[in-house]
Image: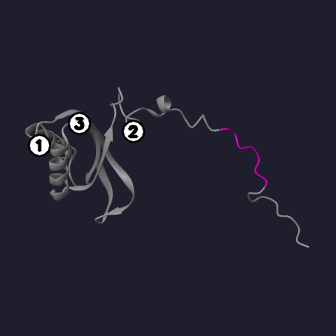
Amino acid sequence: MPLYEHVMIARQDLSNTQAEALIEHFGTILADNGGKLLENEYWGVKTMAYKINKNRKGHYALLRTDAPAPAIQEMERLMRLNEDVMRVLTIKVDAHEDGPSVQMQKREERGDRGDRPDRGDRGDRGGERRERR
């Protein structure tokens, strides 16, 4: 069966237990349609880049599934009909990564952008102005 990853954003006025119950609810929907919820990660309440339905924050969750396409379509349909779910993103993947997602890793484990080269002095950015002629 194909492997999928879903990121779901639920309304901010839900409690943590309600948001986690919502995740379990969609896991049972998958199981009823012949799929499996392999792993779920509750990322907590995060601030969004822009408002969705007058909400500035939302409960984020990642679901890793192994299910046939009709089961995924049914789960997505029910997610979009559920008024507690604001957004859903589904991605088909070749293989699930082992361990926690990047969002769940501590900053020290991810690195602090050390792979970027030092830009040095950028003379074209602000600072002293040249004289006009």
Q: Which residue is mark 2?
A: 103
Residue range corresponding to the magenta coloring = 117-123
91 up-or-down from 50: above or below: above
Mark 1, Cα crowd under 10 Å, few <14 / some 14-19 / many 20+, is: some
Q: Which mark is residue 65?
A: 3
The N terminus, quarter of image = top left
In the rendered image, residue 9, in percent from the top left (x then y), is placed at 28, 51
Whether residues under marks 3 and 1 lie with C-beta atoms below 8 angstroms apart, the answer is no
Image check: 86 left or right of 100? Answer: left
Residue indicated by mark 1: 29
The CA distance from mark 3 to mark 2 is 18 Å
Are circles 3 and 2 on residues that touch, CB within 8 Å? no
Upstream in the sequence, badge 1 or badge 2? 1
**Category of crowding for the residue at label 2, using alpha-carbon neighbours closer than 10 angstroms: few (below 14), some (14–19), many (at least 20):** few
Residue drawn at point x = 69 percent, y = 39 percent: 118
In this view, which residue lies farthest toward the bottom?
A: 133
Label 3 or label 1, whichever comes before in sequence order: 1
Residue shown at 20%/50% (left/top)? 76
Where 38 falls versus 88 (above or below)? above
- Name the element at disc 1: helix
Q: Are marks 1 and 2 in contact (CB under 8 Å)?
A: no
Judge the density around disc 3: few (<14), some (14-19), many (≥20) Cα neighbours within 10 Å: many
